[in-house]
Image (spheres, grey):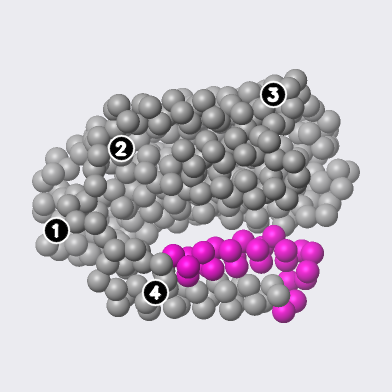
């Protein structure tokens, strides 16, 4: 409801400032939707193999949305105008509301947890300071008092205070025990890396295709179809691989494909052929589609049944954080650059994407072995037997 109302308000915004404010309303709704969606899957499909396949199907839908979003959005912007992209969200939101009411089972905890407003404020300060510092760094200067304050006073201090505070809470917002599980911590880092690469990839490509190459929004959407199609195909396949063989193979394939795509795009020029772009986009779509299912599967691996939904929600939130930071970092790379200098300036962004893919490769190896699984059992020594039994062993 919040997302739909926010979209409706965006569509009638009379000024840029109100549009930004209404987008914040929309974001509040969106921030509640993504983690809950993954928690629904985790609580509904309790057998690991079935859960992995269900997450794969969910990832395929993400790929389809990536295919339809640029196409439908470009068509609407070119024909009706930008307001129409917000109109479209309203009936979809109403339909989702009705279907949720009819088909989604409730899975609330036996005892409601208390709110943790102090931790929530600290998380907001951490992310806001980090994001603002990255975005404003090129303009204000990386050594300016404001930027140093954002990174040191806001981000670092917020982390230190948050950890200290949560360790003393009986019902923390983020249970520190979760991060003692290597599969969970690895899944969080993989989610941030993968979705930072995705957010930066979409951001830079939109600017490159429209501002440098002069394509219309619709044509730019058509050119990204190989990426979206590959993601839609790879995600369900990844879910099956996770269910049959575990998360390591999909993570290695996904990381390698993102590395290959990034290396190709480091040579981007204003005259790069469409075929070359299509190959790079195809590889990125393959890599991104492969990592979605293993992220959630690794996050809930070894978790007790009662905590599986929370772990999946944290992994899903990590995706959103990664996408936000990706846009901020990649945007900082090309800040203030004109169209003629954009291809060369973007090379650093593609190297960053290559590094994110390499991080996924390394984490895919480190977080899927026997040692990593034992850390999850150590983190939840009494609850793990119950969790494994309810998850089908």
Q: Tell me: residue 17, above or below residue 113.
A: above
Residue 163's tag is: 4
Q: Earlier in the sequence, mark 1 or mark 2?
A: 2
Main secondary structure of the magenta stretch: helix
Extent of the magenta region: 120-145
Q: Earlier in the sequence, mark 3 or mark 4?
A: 3
Quarter of the image where one finds residue 264: top right
Residue 41's tag is: 2
Q: Residue at x 62, y 32 (%)?
A: 86
* Disc 1 target residue: 383
Asked whether disc 3 touches disc 4, contact meaning CB atoms under 8 Å apart, the reply is no
Residue 317's tag is: none
Q: Tell me: residue 289, above or below residue 141.
A: above
In the image, taking residue 208 as reference, residue 88 lies left or right, namely left
Q: Earlier in the sequence, mark 2 or mark 3?
A: 2
Query: Are there few (<14), some (14-19), or many (20+) residues within 10 Å of tag 1?
Result: some
Expressed as whole percent of the image width and height from the top left, the position of residue 319 reads: 48, 48
Q: Earlier in the sequence, mark 4 or mark 2?
A: 2
Q: Residue at x 82, y 32 (%)?
A: 213
> Which label sits in the foreground, 1 or 2?
2
Query: Are there few (<14), some (14-19), or many (20+) residues within 10 Å of tag 3?
Result: some
In the image, taking residue 371 as reference, residue 223 lies left or right, namely right
> Which label sits in the foreground, 2 or 3?
3
Quarter of the image where one finds residue 245: top left
Q: Earlier in the sequence, mark 1 or mark 4?
A: 4
Give the CA separation, mark 1 to mark 3. 51 Å
């Amino acid at each position: 409801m919040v997302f739909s109302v926010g979209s409706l308000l965006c569509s009638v915004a009379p000024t840029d400032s109100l549009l930004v404010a209404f987008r914040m309303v929309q974001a509040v709704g969106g921030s509640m939707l993504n983690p809950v969606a993954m928690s629904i899957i985790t609580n509904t499909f309790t057998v690991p193999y079935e859960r992995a396949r269900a997450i794969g199907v969910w990832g395929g839908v993400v790929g389809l949305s990536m295919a339809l979003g640029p196409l439908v959005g470009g068509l609407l912007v070119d024909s009706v105008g930008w307001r129409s992209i917000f109109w479209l969200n309203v009936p979809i939101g109403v339909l989702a509301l009705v279907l949720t009411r009819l088909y989604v089972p409730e899975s609330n905890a036996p005892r409601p947890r208390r709110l943790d407003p102090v931790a929530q404020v600290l998380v907001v300060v951490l992310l806001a300071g980090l994001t603002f510092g990255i975005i404003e760094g090129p303009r204000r200067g990386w050594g300016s008092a404001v930027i140093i304050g954002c990174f040191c006073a806001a981000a670092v201090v917020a982390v230190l205070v948050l950890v200290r505070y949560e360790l003393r809470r009986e019902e923390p917002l983020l249970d520190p025990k979760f991060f003692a599980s290597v599969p969970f911590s690895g899944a969080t880092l993989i989610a941030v890396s993968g979705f930072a690469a995705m957010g930066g990839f979409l951001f830079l490509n939109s600017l490159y295709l429209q501002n440098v190459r002069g394509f219309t929004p619709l044509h730019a959407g058509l050119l990204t179809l190989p990426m979206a199609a590959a993601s839609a195909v790879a995600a369900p396949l990844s879910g099956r691989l996770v269910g049959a063989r575990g998360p390591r193979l999909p993570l290695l394939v996904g990381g390698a494909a993102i590395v290959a795509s990034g290396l190709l795009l480091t040579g981007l020029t204003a005259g790069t052929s469409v075929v070359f772009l299509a190959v790079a986009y195809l590889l990125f779509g393959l890599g991104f589609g492969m990592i979605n299912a293993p992220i959630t599967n690794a996050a809930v691996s070894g978790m007790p049944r009662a905590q599986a939904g929370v772990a999946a929600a944290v992994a899903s939130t990590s995706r959103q954080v990664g996408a936000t930071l990706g846009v901020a970092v990649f945007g900082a790379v090309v800040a203030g650059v004109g169209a003629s200098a954009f291809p060369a300036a973007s090379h650093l962004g593609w190297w960053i994407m290559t590094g994110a893919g390499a991080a996924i490769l390394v984490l895919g190896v480190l977080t899927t072995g026997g040692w990593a699984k034992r850390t999850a059992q150590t983190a939840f020594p009494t609850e793990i037997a119950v969790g494994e039994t309810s998850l089908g062993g």
